[in-house]
Amino acid sequence: MTRRAASSRRPCRVPGRVEPRVAFVVDVDHELITDEEACRFTMCYRSVMGTGHIRFLEAPEEKRYAMNCILRQYSGRDDWRLPDRALQAMAIYSLVIEEMNGKRSPGKS
Protein backbone atom coordinates (compact mmCIF):
# COMPACT_ATOMS: atom_id res chain seq x y z
CA MET A 1 0.00 0.00 0.00
CA THR A 2 1.30 3.47 -0.80
CA ARG A 3 0.06 6.67 0.81
CA ARG A 4 1.13 10.23 0.28
CA ALA A 5 2.74 12.16 3.11
CA ALA A 6 0.43 15.06 4.01
CA SER A 7 3.12 17.74 4.07
CA SER A 8 5.16 16.77 1.02
CA ARG A 9 2.66 14.91 -1.15
CA ARG A 10 5.45 12.44 -1.92
CA PRO A 11 4.54 8.75 -1.76
CA CYS A 12 5.67 6.96 1.38
CA ARG A 13 5.63 3.22 1.91
CA VAL A 14 3.13 1.94 4.48
CA PRO A 15 3.80 -1.61 5.64
CA GLY A 16 0.15 -2.53 6.20
CA ARG A 17 0.12 -5.89 7.93
CA VAL A 18 3.85 -6.45 7.53
CA GLU A 19 5.47 -6.53 10.95
CA PRO A 20 9.18 -5.88 10.50
CA ARG A 21 11.55 -7.10 13.22
CA VAL A 22 13.38 -4.34 15.11
CA ALA A 23 15.89 -3.83 17.88
CA PHE A 24 16.03 -0.81 20.19
CA VAL A 25 18.30 0.74 22.81
CA VAL A 26 17.51 3.44 25.36
CA ASP A 27 20.15 4.74 27.75
CA VAL A 28 20.05 7.38 30.50
CA ASP A 29 22.01 8.78 33.45
CA HIS A 30 25.26 9.24 31.54
CA GLU A 31 28.22 10.30 33.65
CA LEU A 32 31.82 10.62 32.52
CA ILE A 33 34.26 9.18 35.04
CA THR A 34 37.72 10.73 34.67
CA ASP A 35 41.07 9.56 35.92
CA GLU A 36 44.66 10.77 36.03
CA GLU A 37 45.44 8.25 33.27
CA ALA A 38 43.81 8.92 29.90
CA CYS A 39 43.10 5.24 29.24
CA ARG A 40 41.16 4.87 32.50
CA PHE A 41 38.28 7.19 31.57
CA THR A 42 34.90 5.45 31.46
CA MET A 43 31.16 6.17 31.36
CA CYS A 44 28.46 5.24 33.82
CA TYR A 45 24.95 4.69 32.44
CA ARG A 46 21.74 2.69 32.69
CA SER A 47 20.31 1.09 29.56
CA VAL A 48 17.55 -1.10 28.21
CA MET A 49 17.93 -3.15 25.03
CA GLY A 50 15.31 -5.24 23.34
CA THR A 51 13.74 -6.70 20.24
CA GLY A 52 10.24 -6.81 18.88
CA HIS A 53 8.24 -5.84 15.83
CA ILE A 54 6.54 -2.74 14.46
CA ARG A 55 2.77 -2.59 14.07
CA PHE A 56 1.13 0.07 11.94
CA LEU A 57 -1.88 1.64 13.69
CA GLU A 58 -4.79 2.03 11.31
CA ALA A 59 -7.97 2.39 13.41
CA PRO A 60 -8.80 6.01 14.30
CA GLU A 61 -9.40 5.01 17.94
CA GLU A 62 -5.90 3.48 18.17
CA LYS A 63 -4.32 6.54 16.57
CA ARG A 64 -6.26 8.90 18.86
CA TYR A 65 -5.19 6.96 21.97
CA ALA A 66 -1.53 6.88 20.86
CA MET A 67 -1.45 10.60 20.04
CA ASN A 68 -3.09 11.49 23.36
CA CYS A 69 -0.43 9.44 25.20
CA ILE A 70 2.34 11.34 23.40
CA LEU A 71 0.67 14.73 23.93
CA ARG A 72 0.08 13.98 27.62
CA GLN A 73 3.78 13.11 28.05
CA TYR A 74 4.85 16.54 26.79
CA SER A 75 1.96 18.79 27.84
CA GLY A 76 0.48 17.19 30.95
CA ARG A 77 -2.96 17.37 29.32
CA ASP A 78 -5.06 14.45 28.11
CA ASP A 79 -8.07 16.33 26.71
CA TRP A 80 -6.79 17.02 23.19
CA ARG A 81 -9.33 17.02 20.35
CA LEU A 82 -7.91 15.28 17.30
CA PRO A 83 -10.06 15.54 14.17
CA ASP A 84 -10.51 12.36 12.12
CA ARG A 85 -9.07 14.17 9.09
CA ALA A 86 -5.84 14.88 10.98
CA LEU A 87 -5.63 11.27 12.16
CA GLN A 88 -6.08 10.00 8.60
CA ALA A 89 -3.01 11.98 7.52
CA MET A 90 -0.84 10.49 10.30
CA ALA A 91 1.27 7.35 10.04
CA ILE A 92 1.61 6.00 13.57
CA TYR A 93 3.58 2.91 14.49
CA SER A 94 3.65 0.85 17.66
CA LEU A 95 6.75 -0.95 18.90
CA VAL A 96 5.60 -4.32 20.25
CA ILE A 97 8.34 -5.42 22.65
CA GLU A 98 9.03 -9.16 22.76
CA GLU A 99 12.32 -9.29 24.67
CA MET A 100 13.98 -6.72 26.89
CA ASN A 101 17.08 -6.59 29.11
CA GLY A 102 18.39 -3.88 31.41
CA LYS A 103 21.96 -3.03 32.32
CA ARG A 104 23.67 -0.67 34.71
CA SER A 105 27.34 0.02 34.19
CA PRO A 106 29.68 -0.52 37.11
CA GLY A 107 31.06 2.57 38.79
CA LYS A 108 29.45 5.41 40.67
CA SER A 109 25.72 5.00 41.28
Image (cartoon, rainbow, N blue to C red):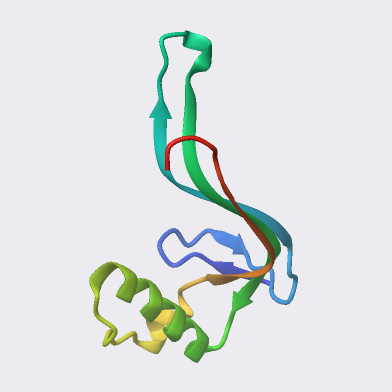
- Where residue 51 sits, quadrant-wise, is bottom right
- Left or right for 17, reference 7: right
**Residue 39: x percent and y percent?**
53, 12
Residue at the spot x=48%, y=41% of the render? 45
In the picture shown, does residue 96 fall above or below 63? above
In the picture shown, does residue 84 fall above or below 48? below
- The quarter of the picture where the C terminus appears is top left
- Left or right for 90, reference 15: left
In the picture shown, does residue 96 fall above or below 108? below
**Residue 64: x percent and y percent?**
43, 85
Q: How many labels does the image show?
A: 0
- Where residue 33 sits, quadrant-wise, is top left
Residue at the spot x=48%, y=31% of the render? 43
**Residue 37: x percent and y percent?**
47, 8
**Residue 83: x percent and y percent?**
35, 87
Residue at the spot x=41%, y=9% of the render? 36
Residue at the spot x=44%, y=58% of the render? 8
- The quarter of the picture where the N terminus appears is bottom right
- Where residue 7 sits, quadrant-wise, is bottom left
Front-most of residues 88 and 54: 54
Q: Outermost residue toward the bottom?
A: 61
In the picture shown, does residue 76 fall above or below 8? below
